Image (tube, grey):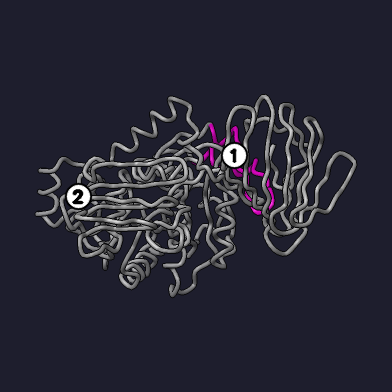
């Protein structure tokens, strides 16, 4: 069985922690590990698992590779989607890249599952059913009349531990959700699946052959780039966008649902995250430097500053480097609207944190003003920034920790701690960490334009344009 990790979501409802360039699946929200790492680690103990296949956005490729490496997973492939086309094409790509009889376990990268034993039991049952040619989905046993999830209605026909699927239904209103809960015949739609690669492709080709054809072309034109498989952009962009549910599961006669009661949560909002987080005696989930007086049932997160809450109830307060969110817990779905407003205003806070991660490390814009900007730059051991120049800015570099190998025009210089160098406007330059510890430095930029798009790259070991 091959786990397929789907990591295409943007997690806009968990802004300001989750951003377009650093979405929730890469964050440690429910534990000390990131959500992607937890998705793979909870498979520990299952037998005969093959290395995973990850499908993600091109912009997230280095984060994906690094987070898998951190927990000791070497993926069979990291497939890069040039554009988002929903889950059916992503899974089709995975299915086309393996043997026809391989069993695929499809797992979104941003779920919480509390009861690992119950999850393992359901996966083993799903594998057995998938070997019989059935398309298995995992239906979450509902605990309340939830209006934020789609539902799966089971039929009376049983297949071992599973039931036939009578219908997939959209997110209901409160009264309808209560009827679903009372009937005992409905499950929350988890978005997790298990099936034989050939079985899925056969049904997908039956109901939506255009997806299969486009994905075949995207794989045929794919190129290997370091540890990544870059799908052909033109072919994949021409692929119809559709979910597994709409493209296959709602139409096939081979669908079955396995009930799963394992403390599942898709962490789709701040209130959902509050639900799965440990709380104090007053019902508050607290992270960071937070003081409370007469505060109840709230989610309070501080990244840098002291946050003090007095006499409030049912609030979400999240403080980051560059943004502060204060929301009523029953209004947190509207966070998505805030992100839309940020995008309309072309504000960087929609996509980027103040700290920006790159394949070589990260930088933090600690100060900026008219014609100047100061960054704290951290370069990983052995990493190297691109050979580049700027048209509108000059740079001063001061080494704070470690050793820097600097290319400045035709020169190469080795800088130690407390040494500095000036890079004039228009000078071709490069920064490298030749040491075994992280290189930390302060960069002061000055010039008429300080945007990140003022970079002309001549060489780049990470394949960036």
In front here: 280 or 329?
280
- Which of pointers 2 and 1 indicates the residue nearer the eye? 2
Residue 404 coordinates in the image, percent (x, y): 77, 53
Residue 318 coordinates in the image, percent (x, y): 36, 47
Give left or right: position of 71 versus 19. Answer: right
Quarter where residue 294 is shown: bottom left
Give left or right: position of 249 versus 153. Answer: right
In front here: 53 or 392?
392
| Residue 440 seen from this side | yes
| Residue 255 seen from this side | no
Mark 2 burial class by Cα count in 10 Å: few <14, some 14-19, many 20+: few
Residue at 69% of width from left, 36% of height from top?
A: 465
Residue at 47% of width from left, 45% of height from top?
A: 321
Mark 2, residue position: 311
Give the number of marks: 2
Residue 126 sits inside the magenta stretch: no
Q: Which region of the structure is painted magenta? A: 212-237
N-term-proximal mark, 2 vs 1? 1
Quarter where residue 223 is shown: top right
Residue at 71% of width from left, 27% of height from top?
A: 392
Residue at 65% of width from left, 40% of height from top?
A: 221
Mark 1, residue position: 217
Residue 6 coordinates in the image, percent (x, y): 46, 51
């Amino acid at each position: 069985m091959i786990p397929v990790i789907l990591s295409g979501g943007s997690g806009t409802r968990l802004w300001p922690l989750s951003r377009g360039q650093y979405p929730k699946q890469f964050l440690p929200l429910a534990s000390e590990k990131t959500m992607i790492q937890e998705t793979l680690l909870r498979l520990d103990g299952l037998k005969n698992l093959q290395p995973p296949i990850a499908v993600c956005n091109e912009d997230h490729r280095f984060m994906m590779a690094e987070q898998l490496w951190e927990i000791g997973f070497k993926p069979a492939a990291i497939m890069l989607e040039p554009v988002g086309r929903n889950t059916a094409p992503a899974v089709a790509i995975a299915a086309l890249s393996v043997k026809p009889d391989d069993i695929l376990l499809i797992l979104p990268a941003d779920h919480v599952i509390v009861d690992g034993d119950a999850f393992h039991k359901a996966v083993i049952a799903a594998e057995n059913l998938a070997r019989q040619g059935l398309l298995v989905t995992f239906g979450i046993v509902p605990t309340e009349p939830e209006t934020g999830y789609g539902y799966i209605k089971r039929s009376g026909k049983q297949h071992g531990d599973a039931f036939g699927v009578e219908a997939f239904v959209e997110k209901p209103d409160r009264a309808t959700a209560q009827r679903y809960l009372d009937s005992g015949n409905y499950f929350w739609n988890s978005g997790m699946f298990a099936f034989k690669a050939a079985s899925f492709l056969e049904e997908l080709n039956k109901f939506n052959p255009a997806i299969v054809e486009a994905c075949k072309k995207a794989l045929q034109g794919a190129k290997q780039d370091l540890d990544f498989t870059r799908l052909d952009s033109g072919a994949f962009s021409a692929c119809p966008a559709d979910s597994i549910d709409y493209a296959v599961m709602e139409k096939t006669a081979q669908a079955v649902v396995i009930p799963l009661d394992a403390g599942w949560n898709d962490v789709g909002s701040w209130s959902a995250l509050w639900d799965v987080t440990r709380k104090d005696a007053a019902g508050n989930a607290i992270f960071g430097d937070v003081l409370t007086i007469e505060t109840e049932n709230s989610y309070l997160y501080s990244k840098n500053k002291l946050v003090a809450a007095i006499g409030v109830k049912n609030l979400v307060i999240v403080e980051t480097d560059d943004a502060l969110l204060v929301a009523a817990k029953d209004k947190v779905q509207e966070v998505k609207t805030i992100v839309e407003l940020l995008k309309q205003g072309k504000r960087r806070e929609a996509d980027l944190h103040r700290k920006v991660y790159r394949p070589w490390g990260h930088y933090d814009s600690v100060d900026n003003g008219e014609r100047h900007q100061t960054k704290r730059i951290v370069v990983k051991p052995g990493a190297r920034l691109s050979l580049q120049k700027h048209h509108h800015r000059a740079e001063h570099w001061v080494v704070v920790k470690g050793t820097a190998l600097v290319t400045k025009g035709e020169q190469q210089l080795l800088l130690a701690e407390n040494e500095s160098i000036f890079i004039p406007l228009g000078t071709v330059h490069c920064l490298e960490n030749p040491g075994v510890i992280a290189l930390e430095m302060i960069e002061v930029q000055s010039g008429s334009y300080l945007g990140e798009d003022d970079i002309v790259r001549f060489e780049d070991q990470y394949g960036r344009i």
